[in-house]
Amino acid sequence: MTLTSLDSNVVLRLVLNDIPEQATRAAQFVSRSNCYVTDVVVAECVFVLEKVYRLDRNLVKDFMTTLFELTTVSFTEALIEKTFDLYVTRPTLSFVDCYSIVEATSEMNRVVTFDQAILKKFAAIAKEPR
């Protein structure tokens, strides 16, 4: 099965419906196509929804979850869902920080960082470079 990767501007039009003509076209396309949303596009959409549209984290998660519930849309489900769970419970961490922590945990890797919030809260998997 061939998948079409959705760009962040298509995802944002779809979840925000802020430009109705584009939102309609995006919805029609997604309804008839097998689509994939990359982790990078998810992260970019989260950033835009939070920083540009100033949506709170729970609403950002809700918007993106609405997209992920579409049967024609696939994504890295376990990783992204766990990332969103951490993202809504740790307001001092960015979505990308949460993604790094979840990915490292799932792969039994470590995160090397200077970020003190990560080092304190996730000492089991995080360390400073030495």
Image: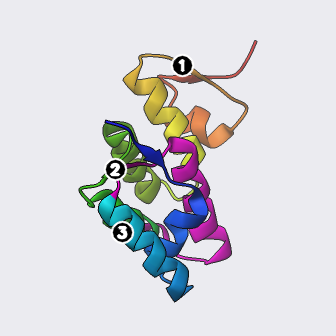
> Residue 13: horizontal and vertical position, in percent?
53, 74
Mark 2 in CB contact with mark 3 (< 8 angstroms): no
Q: Nearer the viewer, mark 3 or mark 1?
A: 3
- Please name the amino acid that badge 3 sits on: Asp
The image quadrant of residue 30 is: bottom left
* Residue 12 percent across, percent down from the top left: 53, 69
Residue span colored magenta: 33-59
- Which label lies toward us, 2 or 3? 2
Tell whether 106 sits left or right of 122: left
Q: Position of residue 61 (x, y in %)?
A: 40, 63
Amino acid type at circle 1 is: Arg
When the figure is inspected, residue 98 is found, relative to residue 56, above or below; the finding is above
Is there CB contact under 8 Å for labels 3 and 1?
A: no
The residue at 48%/53% (across/down) is: 90
Is residue 65 covered in magenta? no
Q: Which residue is mark 3?
A: 62
Question: Does the magenta run of residues contain 54?
Answer: yes
Residue at image point 50% right, 23% down: 125
Q: Tell me: 85 left or right of 104.
A: left
Disc 2 to disc 3, C-alpha distance: 22 Å
Disc number for residue 34: 2
Q: Amino acid at mark 2?
A: Asn
Q: Quadrant of the N terminus?
A: top left
| Element under disc 1 | loop
Please identify the quarter of the rendering in which residue 7 is found: bottom right
